Image (cartoon, helix red, strand yellow):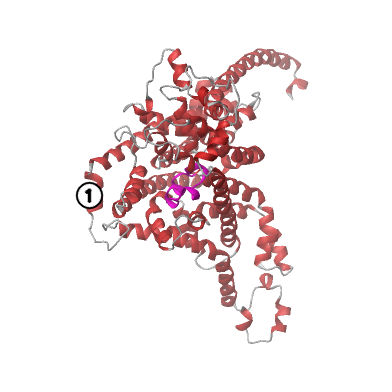
Amino acid sequence: MSTTVHKKPPETRRYRAPAPLGGRRNPAIGQRRKNFQALAFLLPALVVLGAFTAWPMFSALRLSFTDASGFGKEEWVGFENYTRIFTDPVIINAVVNTALYALLFTPTAVALALALALLLNDPRLPFRGFFRTALFLPFIISLAVAAIAWAYLIDPQVGLLNYWLGNAGIRIGNVLQDPVLAMPAVAFVAVWKSFGFYMVIFLAGLQEIPGTLYEAARVDGAGPWTRFRHVTMPMLSNTTAFVLIFALIAALQAFDQIYVMTGGGPYGHTETVVMQIYTSGFRKLDVGFASALSYVLLAATLLLSVIQFVFFGKREREGD
Amino acid sequence: MSTTLHPQLASRSTGTGTRSTKRSALNRALVVALLALATAVILLPIAIIAFTAFKPAAEVNAFPPTLIPGQWTLDNFARIFQELPFARLIANSFIFAGGVTLFALLFDSLAAYALARIDFTGKKILLIAIIASLMIPFQATLVPVYQLASELGWVNTFAALIVPRAADAFGIFFLRQFFLSLPRDLDNAARIDGASEWRVYWNIVLPNAMPAVLTLGVFVFVNNWNDLLWPLIFTTDREMGTLTSGLTLLTGPGGIVPYGVMMAGALVAILPLAAIFMFVQRRFIESVATTGLK
């Protein structure tokens, strides 16, 4: 490529072969060459990300101010779609439900993950590898498939778990048709799927805590609870913050198991924001409104990501 | 170490040692019991899938319900081929998840190489843009991506399923971090020998980054294989669905849910992932732990 730029005949290039070591005579040409090379490497990814992430971001923003329906001409409607999000009872319900889902899912998943990570953290524990693998296993199973299995387990007529709990004197009835229990049930399926993933992150965090800290605490006469409270928790706070926010972001995107188990019912008690994006964007073809809803989801996610970024930045600055 | 130097101290410490060893052995047994219980609860849905798949219909809907089939049958597997275009769904899942994985690994690693090894103009800005787009949930751009795909006439084709995911910010970032950790001496040596950037990428950096590439590959494959919303939106034709989206077709509103058939389908949907997982689990879990992302 650079041969066209150089006036000299190509043979002279042979003498300049180790150029990266000695440096080129004209840095501008070297830089241009590097830019071309980088572009060649970046082009496929940039085309894909540009067309299917960057452009849709702008497109969604524009659509969110229109009454687009996928057909015909769309009219500019200003902030109407956004006002609707905060006035339409169906949407408010979905937003409240998503928050409720996040409140049910996040602390449960994170606490369970932390508790099991603490139990698994003993290197001399028998079957440690087996437990770690078994508890992580749900992570590779799709929420849709897990939802089918759980729906069968808690089926009011033929559900095995329902039957066992009934024998133990706990009557849960028709959970998925129960306005109070349906949401905890779908949140639980997500806990089941993802806690193993968070547990593994906690385990890595626990392994980074230097053993000398525990020895020092023991010398000072600290019992297991004091050691947990004053060594483990503070040393694990960054990991905990990371996992918490990560779980919150995941909670905002709740869809799969709800679609399979309840379809948003009973009476909208498990409708979430992403369920509404799906319904309005792809069922009712209310594209403009779905775009506005998407932007609200995006804003919430970005807010959480920024908080996470600040936490991580802090850790980097403090040099861990 | 101190045992050889101070016999007195040593005997005392072994004395407390046995007592605390006994106690910690008891503790450990308790922990194992607790973990065994937790594991049993966690594995229950997987067990119900595996066992129900082989149950005759009468047992599936029998009361009181049982876990293990009294009679084993393959009826459910035969029936799922009648209820759904099941062979097509399996093939579609492999083409979709496999296609996305192959393209994403290639395109992500190419871009990651440029970001890790070539000093080009605007590198910092591009890196920031990529990190920023990590935060965009795909649900947020679903509507315009669908519109674009439909304008291109891609709905109900593999192009719509695969092309929008042929590169992703997370993969680029993940691989870039790994490439940066590889010693530069290796590729500089090759450059001095006259190797082009392409050769350095293909013959030196990529082979040395295989652990990271494989981990990312498993991630991408599992995520796409399991995704419900994506195939649900881009395929309206039953013949173009994936295993995950196809199975949900059986949960019709109202009617009796054919649990036995669904569990057979679910088992088939889980098996390839379980196989991959068994193969790579140690490395996979460890890299999940260290990267702690997605």
Depicted B232 relative to depicted A16: above or below:
above
Q: Camera-side residue: A72 or B13?
A: A72
Give SS at disc 1.
helix
Q: Nearer the viewer, residue A28 or A317?
A: A28
Q: Which residues are magenta?
A: B227-245
- Circle 1 residue: A83
How far from the left and from the top, in percent, is residue B5?
76, 21
Residue A235 is at least partly visible in this image: no
> With respect to residue A223, does A187 lie above or below?
below
Q: Foreground: A44 or B26?
A: A44
Residue B164 within the segment the image draws in magenta: no
Residue B182, image x, y percentages: 65, 54
**In x, y percent, where is residue B122?**
49, 66
Q: State left or right for residue A196 relative to residue B236.
A: right
Question: Does B228 appear in magenta?
Answer: yes
Q: Main secondary structure of the magenta part?
A: helix
Q: Is A171 rendered above or below residue B172? A: above
Chain ID for label 1?
A: A
Query: Residue B139: x and y, percent?
Result: 40, 49
At 64% from the left and 81% from the top, the residue drawn is A3
Answer left or right for A8 relative to B122.
Answer: right
Three-letter code for the amino acid on which mark 1 is drawn: Thr
Decide if residue A20 is on the left or right side of residue B162: right
Q: Is residue B121 above or below residue B212?
A: below
